[in-house]
Amino acid sequence: MRVTVTHPRELGQPELSRWRALQESDAAFDNPFLSPEFTVTVGELRDLVRVAVLYDGPDIVGFFPFERHPLGIGKPVAAGLTDAQGLVHAKGLDLDPRRLIKDCGLSVYEFDHLVAGQPLLGDGRHTVHPSPIIDLRDGYGPYTETLRTHSGKTYKTTLAKSRKLQREAGPLRHDYATTDTGPLHTLLGWKTDQYRRTGRTDRFAHRWIVELVERLLATQSDSFAGVLDMVYVDDVPMAGHFGVRTRTTLAGWFPAYDTQYAKFSPGLIHHLAMAESAAASGVQVIDMGRGEKEYKDKLKNGQLEVAEGRVARAGVAAGVHWMMRVPVRKTRATVMANPLLLKTADKALKTYGRLRTVLQG
């Protein structure tokens, strides 16, 4: 196997077409974060993005997108933002993960949402985590029947709150797959407020992330697109979501709502509306991403699996990386797996968020 490493802007149309063909040949790769359009767009904004192109003789058999950080530390493209990571490759590809990262000029490659079946998982130094989905392959009607059976109280309560909202505030309107940047910035403003309110880092304080979302919204094709959808009450925006899609998978990414409507469960109202419109447009799966969230538990009717870990070559850089990252990752995984610890940590973050808001106000 031969490996060449290039910046995504240097990939030609033959390479991009081969990438799409490999992606569409295996359901494990059916996620927009693994699409060439996503890597190319991030590469326009982040010069540290690279793509390893894998050859078997004259044939391209794989694409490995990554970011190359100082000391040879490799990370997924748009690390910390994406819910699907890994190598897009031909079936039956056999490779040595350490040899691959050496060919990429890396000492370590760390990941936290590596999709199933990756040859990068060869050394077993990883943990596996569920990634909840809304499975719409049988259609929206059968999905709601599943909700009635397994989350009946949630489903009925959400419908009742929707009716109450319309009686008190006005009719609901759902605008699916709009490309208007005005509602997009309304949504990002809500998300920034949510990050601050809950003590999280505001991702949209980074200009490149805002520009990434804007560019993805402007990217519209059959195989890949940015998807913005908003729910309005009496023509006033109430809740929304921005994500990206392939032909059949919509990746949940940035959901948010106006907190003045919080008592009506606007997030759940919105997700049901989004699922209905997505199914009508041909989407078969909404991947809500790894992470313990109450709304995901209420809405899911299936799950995928993603892995967290690293591939490392022996050396000083890999040792330093282990000391800085692995104990922290293990501690976080312990907290996430324990409902009591997770609740305590979430409460502490929200308290911090309130204090920060007061001090900055």
Image: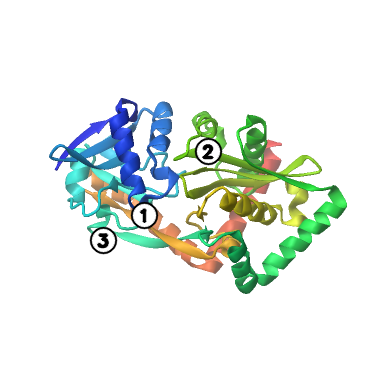
Q: Is residue 137 above or below residue 77?
A: below
Q: Amino acid at mark 2?
A: Gly
User: If you read the primary sequence from the N terminus, does the residue marked by circle 2 or circle 3 appear first?
Assistant: 3
Q: Which residue is mark 1?
A: 28
> Residue 58: horizontal and vertical position, in percent?
15, 37
Q: Secondary structure at mark 2?
A: strand
Q: Residue at x 18, y 50 (%)?
A: 95
User: If you read the primary sequence from the N terminus, does the residue marked by circle 1 or circle 3 appear first?
Assistant: 1
Q: Residue at x 55, y 42 (%)?
A: 201
Q: Which residue is mark 2?
A: 226
Q: Which mark is residue 265?
A: none
For label 1, count other residues whose C-alpha is less than 10 Å away and answer few (under 14), some (14-19) or many (20+).
some
Q: Amino acid at mark 3?
A: Gly
> Residue 28: horizontal and vertical position, in percent?
36, 54
Query: Which of 236/49 is in front?
Result: 236
Q: Amino acid at mark 1?
A: Ala
Residue 202: name its quadrant: top right
Q: Secondary structure at mark 3?
A: loop
Left or right of 299? Residue 336 is left
Left or right of 298? Residue 3 is left
Q: Secondary structure at mark 1?
A: helix
Q: Which residue is mark 3?
A: 124
> Residue 247: horizontal and vertical position, in percent?
46, 45
Q: How many marks?
A: 3
